[in-house]
Image (cartoon, rainbow, N blue to C red):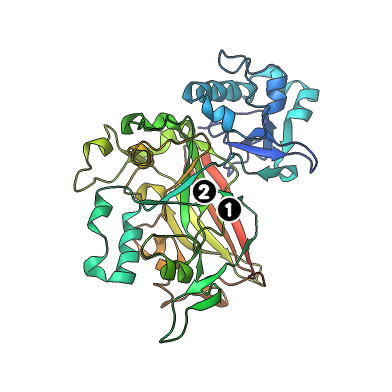
Amino acid sequence: MGLKSFVEVPADSHFPLENLPYGVFKPEPNSPPRPAVAVGNHVLDLSVIASAGLFDGPILKNSDCFNQPNLNKFLELGRPAWKEARASLQKLLSATEPTLRDSASLRSKALVPMDKAQMLLPIAVGDYSDFFSSMHHAKNCGTIFRGPENAINPNWFQLPIAYHGRASSIVISGTDIIRPRGQAHPTGNSPPYFGPSRRLDFELEMAAVVGPGNELGKPIDVNDAAGHIFGLVLMNDWSARDIQAWEYVPLGPFLGKSFGTTVSPWIVTLDALEPFSCDAPIQNPPPLPYLAEKTSKNYDISLEVLIKPAGQEDSFVITRSNFKHLYWTITQQLAHHTINGCNLRSGDLLGTGTISGPEPESFGCLLELTWNGQNPVSLGATTRRFLEDGDEVVFTGFCKGDGYNVGFGTCSGKILPAST
């Protein structure tokens, strides 16, 4: 059974003591941002805990990493500091530890009801790359656009393919997304279409948050890569399929992707996810030596997407997938990213790409679920081929433990009409 905290943790909570994900919040609109962990229906203000001298381990005792407006300085300290913080916080929040439990003044300052907290981007994202690591997604997209005989290009099985995304348009869950305008395929001899995207889509992804980086010119060994990953967030890499289809030859995604990428506010650490690790799929052909892992693992994270259609009160589950379906692991993604000497930095985000499962009900985007608009999905009294203005998309994800969950909360965004 789960660990016991003096802070009430509802049975269905994503945030028990086994989790303690990290985020950044404001308790009041005019307050400075401060780091926190989530526990039950509360956030624990780490700046208060640090100022009270309750991080007394050798690494964090004299550190100001929790008196920062983001988590980047904490991420730079690496796994020994992360483990020290986790052990200190689990002890401090446990039902048998009186330090915080029995101090009403400290509790009132340190514990903030989650519904009173304004969540912010937890990291300063310097760079963002998005991979294409689900074989089922790659096969479906290739079949739609090139036919089943050429569904997956040969290089896909040799390396984790990615593109460089736009860090400036990464936003926190709950931020509205304005429908992008751009060019799309011409009809007949007409000029290209220009206007609001007609094929706006979500992409069910997760993203790895980079901890310590590497020096320029010095790749990270694939078997050391986990030490450079702090944790995971849910991510929706919104996609304008029509803009993307017209622009991506020959250089790949650009305006069809860069208008908005939504991430969940809480970063779940790899230490919290470790009990839910599982074998990654067998890779055939075997990867080149620099991608060959001694232990190749994914995580058993159940993922779900709901759409609340414009003008309706109810939300509808339209797909259920799982992180374990990824072909290329997050450690292979990170190692490949640095193999040419590229230097990653703390706070960089590495998106997994759309996470699709093998069955139609586990496909990770509307492009696949509707087979490029041919088969609309049902949402109660209405249907969708692609997203319409006013639609709200909500991701959620969690791991199921023995009497507890380790979850990510939600990652949501609502589509607003294109700007004029």
Q: Which mark is residue 234?
A: 2
Q: Is residue 10 left or right of residue 224?
A: right
Q: Position of residue 49 (x, y in %)?
A: 69, 23
- The answer to which quarter of the image holds residue 104 is top right
Q: Is residue 129 left or right of residue 51?
A: left
Residue found at x 41% / y 73%: 372
- The answer to which quarter of the image holds residue 53 is top right
Q: Position of residue 196 (x, y in %)?
A: 57, 73
Q: Position of residue 297 (x, y in %)?
A: 33, 38
Instruction: Check the picture and name the quadrant holding the C terminus.
Output: bottom right
Q: Earlier in the sequence, mark 1 or mark 2?
A: 1
Residue found at x 63% / y 35%: 70
Q: Nearer the viewer, mark 1 or mark 2?
A: 1
Q: Nearer the viewer, residue 249 or 408?
A: 249
Q: Residues within 10 Å of mark 2 (few under 14, many from 20)?
A: many
In this picture, is 332 found above or below 381?
above
Q: Is residue 371 left or right of residue 382?
A: left
Cα distance between the residues tagged 1 and 2: 16 Å
Q: Position of residue 325 (x, y in %)?
A: 35, 50
* Residue type of the residue flagged with mark 1: Ser
In this picture, is 44 found above or below 162?
above
Residue found at x 40% / y 62%: 363
Residue farthest left in this picture:
285
Look at the numbered disc 1 and give the secondary structure of its residue: helix
Question: Residue under circle 1?
Answer: 169
